[in-house]
Image (tube, rainbow, N blue to C red):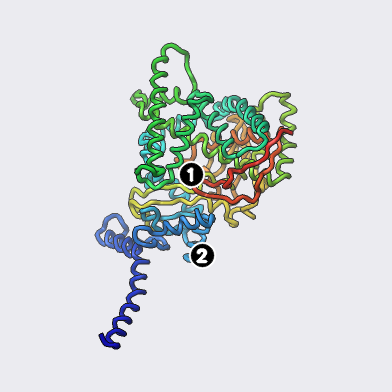
Amino acid sequence: MGVSELAWWLGLLLGAIPLLVQAIWYWNDVRFLASLKLRSACGNNVKQGGGKLPPGHMGLPFLGETLSFLWYNKILRRPDDFIHSKRNRYGEGVGMYRSYLFGSPTIITCSPASNKFVLQSAEDFRIGWPAPELAGRDSIINVEGKQHARLRGFILDAINQPNSLRRIARMVQPRMVSALQCWAEKGTINALLETNKVTFENICSMFISMEPGPRLDEIHKYFEGLIAGFRAYPISFPGTPFHHALRCRKKLAAMLKVELEKRKQRKSETDENNDLMDSLMRVKDEEGKQLSDDEVVDNMITFVIGGYKSTALAMMWALYHISKSPEVLQRLREENTVISKRKKGDFITMEDVSQMKYTAKVVEETIRLANPASSIFRVANRDVDYKGFVIPKGWQVLVWIRSLHIDAKNFDNPLSFNPERWNVSLTMEELDEGNCLQGNRLSICDSLQSCELLQRPPEPGTYQVFGGGPRICAGNMLARLQLTIILHHLALGYKWELLNPKAKLTYTPYPKPVDGAAMTFHAL
């Protein structure tokens, strides 16, 4: 081969490499854009002249932007920089970007308006996470229409209404007080583990009448294994988190079915039992048909997870942030001491909670910064148009919530722990009568006649910690109540200090300090 021929081939190779790199780099974009244009040309639901995807980049073949997403979340531990990188490159736009994550073409929404649009459009978007085989196909998470409305109405009545909250306030305090005394005796605690334990025990006592002991410890282990698989890639291969989660769920289902049969057998022998499981067994549809055993079990698993995990995480973050904010702890002590003197040793009630205005601000600020559910997954049921862009049928939608709560446009100095930012109140007359939710305003009610608003976001839709739309978290008031109560008892009787105030944070599967907020903990 002559020199000139070799030079020709070398030039061809060098010229082809950039073209090949570009072809690989834009493969997913070209592939899905071409598919959308073809469907539009054929008149398959996509509006003629439409079919315009949001700006963005869909990454490499098969992988998409998954590696970049994991890089920001797991390696750099700056999850919001993934969104910032898109904003910096493509602009704010309509708060929506295209991507390809975890094997699926994805639309990311990250603005108050676009998030609200997806969350409120229940007919256009179905649940995309967690996997149905983990949550349960008959769970409130996965059912639609009348079945979802019936289950949601049941859980709202059971744990989110004033009378229910009054009863719950009495039930949870003895175990909380006992747990705090135990922490003080230990002297050093892992706050994440301890808040997880006390919250799980309270929820299981309320929901399935199970008290602490070896059996409950085993159930707790299975719930933790199940939750660990929620954000794992859905490959059921031995050794994977998803496979382990499936095994844990199978064991939980078997144990709850045994409990269910016991309750059926003693049904005629005992008076009415008012825990959540018994109440769920009595739920009927329009035709008077009760839920099947699978429906009861699937929903009890969902209710327990929803009742304890996020609340425990918020409690841990409250301990974390207050330990760094002595002025906040001092104000908590002042307010709660006044309440305590009136009680003369009795536990606080919902009427007392409604008077704890500063404590309520601490609760909201804790939840805002904790971001226990940083994102919500949906799947488009059909081609959906939003402000001139299309969200194609079958595409995954990642509703990125946490970015709203740490955006300086929405909250001044957003990374600072500042309860005073919640200095707005609203009277009951400005809310729907007897309704603890109106739009994005959230409140704790001490009765149907009086209500103290806990917060009012600077702009509508910028506070979405509990989601939104018809699937907004049904237990949001239960979570607030538990956090308020433990703050009351913490402020009155204890002091604590982080062992490593500068511990790094991790964000997967949920945000927490790497040491679980290890701290010294003592009685005053």
Quadrant of the image occupied by residue 6: bottom left
Q: Nearer the viewer, mark 2 or mark 1?
A: 2
Residue beneath the point at 71% across and 38% down? 495
Give the Cα distance between marks 2 and 1.
27 Å
Q: Label 2's element?
A: helix
Residue 212 seen in this snapshot: yes
Residue 305 x, y percent position in the rendering: 48, 35
Residue 426 to residue 213: above or below: below
Q: Nearer the viewer, residue 360 or 219?
A: 219
Q: Nearer the viewer, residue 381 or 2?
A: 2
Left or right: 20, with 71 as reference point: left
Q: What residue did someone put label 2 on?
A: 88
Disc 1 residue crowd, few under 14, some 14–19, many 20+, Cα 10 Å: some
Residue type at numbered disc 1? Gly
Residue type at numbered disc 2? Asn
Residue 468 disc label:
1
Left or right: 396, with 9 as reference point: right
Residue 51 to residue 262: above or below: below
Residue 58 x, y percent position in the rendering: 39, 61
Asked whether the beta carbons under mark 2 and mark 1 sit within 8 Å of each other, the answer is no
Disc 2 residue crowd, few under 14, some 14–19, many 20+, Cα 10 Å: few
Q: Label 1's element?
A: loop
Mark 2 or mark 1, earlier in chain: 2
